[in-house]
Amino acid sequence: MKIEPRQVEAFLKKPDPRIRGVVIYGNDDGLVAERAVALAKAICPDLGDPFRVVDIAGEVLKHDPARLADEFGAMSMMGGRRVVRVRPAGEESTAALENLVAATAGDALIVVEGGNLTPRSGLRALAESEACLAAMPCYMDNEAALEGLVESAARAQGLTVDADALPWIVERLGGDRGQTRSEIEKLLLYKAGGGAGDTSKTITLADAIDILGDTAAIGIDNVIAATFDGELVALDRALDRVFSEGGHPVQLVRSLQRHADQLHIVSAHAGKGGNMESAMFKARGLPRGGPVRQRFERHLRAWPLPRLSASLTAILEAEMECKRTGLPDEAIARRLCLRLAQAARSAKARR
C-alpha cells in the first residue's frame, strides 16, 4: 500500500499492525531519516535497546535474503515488539522483502530507508503493491510546507513569526528536512534565549537576518542578480560560491522562482493600467528601498511579461527535474541559471 501525505502523521504515531514492513524513500534524505526514527520509536521508544532493535545494512541482505523473514519471526528476550531497521537500502533488498511477505509468522516491524527510489524501482513497487507492506514517499518541502513547519515550531516554543520575516526565512531554508530543522532550531534557540537582549515573543526579520543571513544566502542574492542581469561571468562566480558554501540547489531554484513571481505580479499589474508603486508595495517580501529595490526595478525594465512567463515555466520544469529525474540537482540548477542569463543577455544585445 502507498501511504498518502495526509495519512503520514497518523501512521507514524500509530502504525497499522497489519503492516510488516515500511519502505521510506524520496529525495529528502533528512525527512527519510526523521520519519524512519519516528516510526521506529512508535514501536520501541528506546532505539538503543539491543533486545528490541536490530540494524541491518541493505548490502547484508543482498547476500542473506532470508535474514528479514528470520528477524520478523524472532521474539524479544525481554518482551515487547521488535524493530528491524534496514539502512541504507536499495534494490539489493528486494528479494529479502519478498521473503518477508512470504513469512508465515512474526510481529516485528521492518523499517527500510530506501533513498531516492524511482517509479521503476522493484523495491518501491513491491512495497506499494503488497497488502502487508507500505511505501512512504518523502519529497523536499514546498514553500507552504516550510511556512507551516516554521510556524508550528515557533508556536511550540510560545513564539510567533512576524509576517515580513516568514517569507524571508522560508526562502533561506533548504529543501532537506534535516537541514531545515537545524536552521529553525538555531533561530528558536536564539529567540527563546533573549538574543541581543530582546525579550519579545515575536521573531522579526532582524532576528532572522542575524541568525540565518549566512554567506550562502548572500551568494544566492548574487546569483539572482547575475542571472536576471545576464552577467555570465559574475553568475559563474556566484554559483561556485553558493555551492562551495553549502547552498542547496532546490533552495536556489525556489529563490529564482520567488523573484520571477514578484516581477510577474508587478509587471502584470502595471500592464493592466495599474499603479507601479502600488503593485510593488503589494509584492510579498519586496524591500521598499535600497540596492535590492533598484535591482528589482532594473529587472522589471529588462524582463517583459512574455519572457517572465517563459522563465517561470523553465523554473518549474527545473524543480520537477530535481524531484523526479535523479539527475544531479546542482547541474540542473546551473543549467537553469545559464539558460535564463543567456535569455537576458540576448535581449540586452537586441536593445
Image (spheres, rainbow, N blue to C red):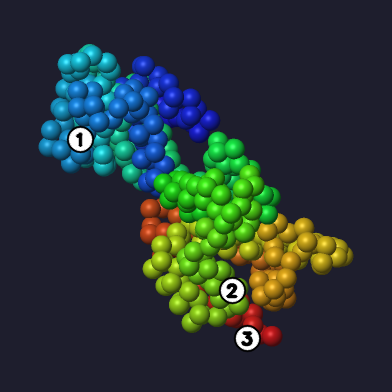
- In the figure, 16 relative to 164: above or below? above
Asked whether disc 1 touches disc 2, contact meaning CB atoms under 8 Å apart, the reply is no
In the drawing, does residue 1 fall left or right of residue 202?
A: left
1 or 2: tag closer to the N-terminus: 1
Q: Which mark is residue 71?
A: none
**Label 3, on which residue?**
349
Label 2 and label 3: CA atoms lie apart by 18 Å
**10 Å crowding of disc 2: few (<14), some (14-19), many (20+):** many
Q: Position of residue 50 (x, y in %)?
A: 19, 27
**As shown in the figure, which amino acid type bears the numbered disc 2?**
Ala
Q: Secondary structure at mark 1?
A: strand
In the rendered image, the residue lying farthest to the left is 63
**From where the camera sits, is residue 340 visible?**
no
- In the figure, 240 relative to 53: above or below? below
Residue at x 63%, y 63% (from the top left corner): 259
- In the figure, 188 relative to 41: above or below? below
Residue at x 52%, y 51% (from the top left corner): 190
Image quarter where the C terminus lies is bottom right
**From where the camera sits, is residue 141 visible?**
yes
**10 Å crowding of disc 1: few (<14), some (14-19), many (20+):** some
In the drawing, does residue 105 fall left or right of residue 204?
A: left
**Label 1, on which residue?**
56
Find residue 228 and report its image quarter.
Answer: bottom right
- In the figure, 245 relative to 112: above or below? below
Q: Which mark is residue 225?
A: 2
Label 1 and label 2: CA atoms lie apart by 48 Å
**As shown in the figure, which amino acid type bears the numbered disc 1?**
Ile
